[in-house]
Image: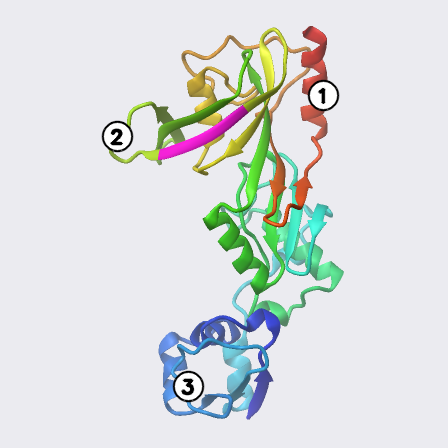
Amino acid sequence: MKEEVIKKNEANQRFDKYLKKRLPSATTGFLYKMLRKKNILLNNAKAEGSEKLKEGDRVSFYFSDETLRTFSAQTREETWMTDSRYHVPEILYETTDLIFLNKPAGLLSQKAKEEDFSANEQLLRYLFEKGDITKESLSTFRPAICNRLDRNTSGVLIGGKTLSGLQEAARLLKERTLEKTYHALVSGKMSEAMQTKAFLSKNPQTNRVTVTKQEHEGAFLIQTDYMPLETGEDWTLVSIRLITGKTHQIRAHLEYLGYPIIGDPKYQGAGSQKPLKIPVRVKRQMLHARECTLPDGTIVTAPYPADFSKTLDALRKIG
């Protein structure tokens, strides 16, 4: 018999979900069979699997050591532990439960393919090297990035270091009580602030979205606030506040309004301003997740990356 005590990051989840993480090589049917036969007990009593775990609960496994080792075997290969693509992330703000990173352009927020290395793996490696997580703790809980930015959009990413942190971040994002502000460099002179609504639909084949004024089948209502911060003859540094958050919302909406983001390879369509002649090479969309404002008033700010600052300086010079 082996007894284990539920820790903070393992609490507040269903018992059966915990068991599936703890014994990843066991089938769901086997786990429920062990619960019925009392080979797995919760606080020395028979359990159904639907119980919500609390910190300090005791789980007893009436297995042989060999059986426990067999079903505890991890099938996931933790390649991020030694991946040469790792760079120490820029930490903007950190609490016991939450962590805010400044994602560079070119880095995925989360993996699209198994061989990818993303901000999610970067976070795991950072916490592993810091000693906040171990190989053993990963069997029942994994910290994770909670929001997404396009690969070539830079700025604030939110991560959950603990189960409480993941749950808090999910709640804040769902309830929209965490305010996100973006900055973008756009073609065209935006002379006044705008509070806008439109409808967005996505083509899954092209991974491109379309914005229209009229509602239609399959379209989602989007709401975005725009505030010009600095303008030139044919450009604007604009602050953007997302009310809704759909795929490519900012990029496609600005194109639709006639203010395409400078350097955006996908959203430079008809009706947009003529491309600006900038004396620097722009390799990606000039869109940056600038700030997150937490419900307690804490503001997490991501400094501009070098290419964004360089483009803004070049625009200022051409007027």
Between 138 and 99, the one nearer to me in the picture: 99
For disc 3, the marked residue is 47
Q: Quadrant of the N terminus?
A: bottom right
Q: Is residue 220 left or right of residue 17?
A: left
Identified by mark 1, the residue type is Lys
Q: Residues within 10 Å of mark 2 (few under 14, many from 20)?
A: few
Between 48 and 63, the one nearer to me in the picture: 48
Residue 131 visible somewhere in the drawing: yes
For disc 1, the marked residue is 310
Tell me if residue 79 comes above or below residue 176 in the rendering. Answer: below
The residue located at (54%, 74%) in the rendering is 73
Identified by mark 3, the residue type is Ala
Tell me the quarter of the picture where residue 238 sits.
top right
Residue at the extreme left: 217
The residue located at (63%, 10%) in the rendering is 232
Q: Secondary structure at mark 3?
A: loop
Q: Quadrant of the C terminus?
A: top right
In the rendered structure, does residue 172 fall within the stretch colored magenta? no
- Coordinates of residue 117 in the picture (x, y in percent): 60, 47
Disc number lying in front (1 or 2): 2
